[in-house]
Image (cartoon, rainbow, N blue to C red):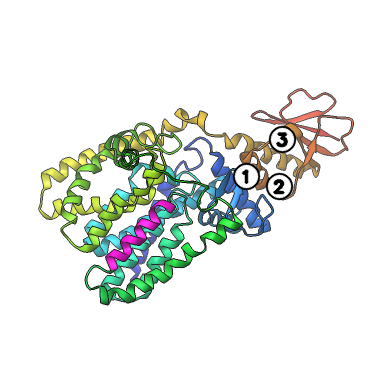
Amino acid sequence: MDTKKILLFLITALALVLFFSYKLTSVPSGITIDEASFGYNGVLLARTLHDENNRKLPIFVLSIGGSDWRQPVTQYLTAATFKVFGPSLMNLKMVTVVIAVSSIFLLYFLAKHLLGNVGAIVSSIFLATTPIFMVHSHLALDNIAPVPFVILWLLGLYLFTKSKKKYWLIISAVALGISYYSYKSMRIFVPIWTLLSLIYLAKENLKKAVKPILFFSFSILPFFAVIPVLEYLYAGAVLNKINPEINSIYTFVSFYFSNFDPSFLYVKGDVLLFHSTGRHGMYLLASLPFFVVGLITSWKKSIYWKLIIASFFLGPLMFGYIGEIHRASRLLPLIPLYALITGSGFLYLWQRKSKILIGILAVFFAINYFDFIHYYLGSYANDTKNIFFCFKCIDGGFKTLKEESKSREFTPYVDEVILKGLNPTRDFAKTIYFETALNSWNGDVKSLLKNVVIMTDNGNVEDLKQINQFDRYYFYIKE
């Protein structure tokens, strides 16, 4: 790679990071309990190698009062980020920004092999402008974590086909295996995609395909073989204690087809405003014409494109068991497949010099995207502020306590009312500023030692000197 290409890569990477991190800590206006749990355990693992349950380097972290498991990929990326750069809300969310930007570059690399430079650029643009992709780049959740691994899986299979070098099969299978533990919905996708991969490898002559099939199978097998052990050590972390059943073939088909409901995909979006604007679909409506053209034309190209299309439509097959509909956040692993098919559709029109049609669709696309980005980076935060926990409120409280106690060299205390109960948001904010447990104050002024700073939500504490206030928190000292 020459100097110009390296410089272009660095400039593009920086531009993408700046774009996806714009208003990162203010859009949305707060965080979810899952984000706080990733952050809290990320700090603990970075500092002590133990999670909130005092388990040393667990593969899965049990969180939210024992009700949910943190998947290892995002959890340990978060811990590593905190170890290097220190804990903060910005650094917590930068993990998903890096995942998003990495995915765009990986998709470009794959699409360049398939579609050439123009098709690669357009496919990358389709990925970067997908509404739910943008939304999840601002959420410190693991929904977006499978995306780069899905691309690596496809890339490995393609490069093996072209080079016949077996190590590409190992890379492909390992990437797909890691994705299984990157997000819970991958338990649905990975078995189907593994089967499709084996069918793809056996596409021509089964005798010649024996070795490739064995390479791929033995590379991914450990990720499945270890499930009983993991379920024994972390009950429910892998299989989530779900006992799928089909009431009827009609309900199965109904739940499956709901994943491709056009109004959901292109207009309404996810049923939860955590994962959607409520005004825009999972994909941009303007991308639909390119996707349809891509479907029709790509199927005829090669067996590899048949793999991409089959993976897109068959990947969510087992969601027919789950019984929930219109959960776009669970379909994020499909986005790179969608972007490739859509990019292929654009390239088909481009090569046939359909300039007027492309121009009309491009204008429609620009209007559609800027309507989304204008709302998301503008009004969305205020419209959804009541569904997110206000992190800056409690973060500012502990920051002020840290500053006041440090400047005076006083001992920090926190009202026991604030410390009471399950609250990952509070615990994350607290661990950012304090590495050891804080002293708890029961409200009794007389029992207090001297030279202490108290953080409380009581604005009228007699016999103590108030020194500061942040949001709903008041700060007093006893000298």
Q: Is 243 on the left or on the right of 215, as rendered? A: right
Q: Are marks 2 and 1 in contact (CB under 8 Å)?
A: no
The amino acid marked with disc number 1 is: Gly
**Residue 121 shows in this picture:** no
Say which of 428 and 223 sits in front.
223
Q: Secondary structure at mark 2?
A: loop
> Which of the 4 image quarters holds residue 257?
top left
Instruction: Write the residue at 51% across / 53% down.
Output: 238
Span colored in magenta: 187-201
Q: Does residue 8 lie above or below 368 as drawn?
A: below
Instruction: Write the residue at 63% across / 60% down.
Output: 57
Q: Secondary structure at mark 3?
A: loop
Task: State the residue position of label 3.
Answer: 420
Which label sits in the foreground, 3 or 1? 1
Q: Secondary structure at mark 1?
A: loop
View extreme (front): residue: 248
Q: Does residue 159 lie above or below 96 as drawn?
A: below
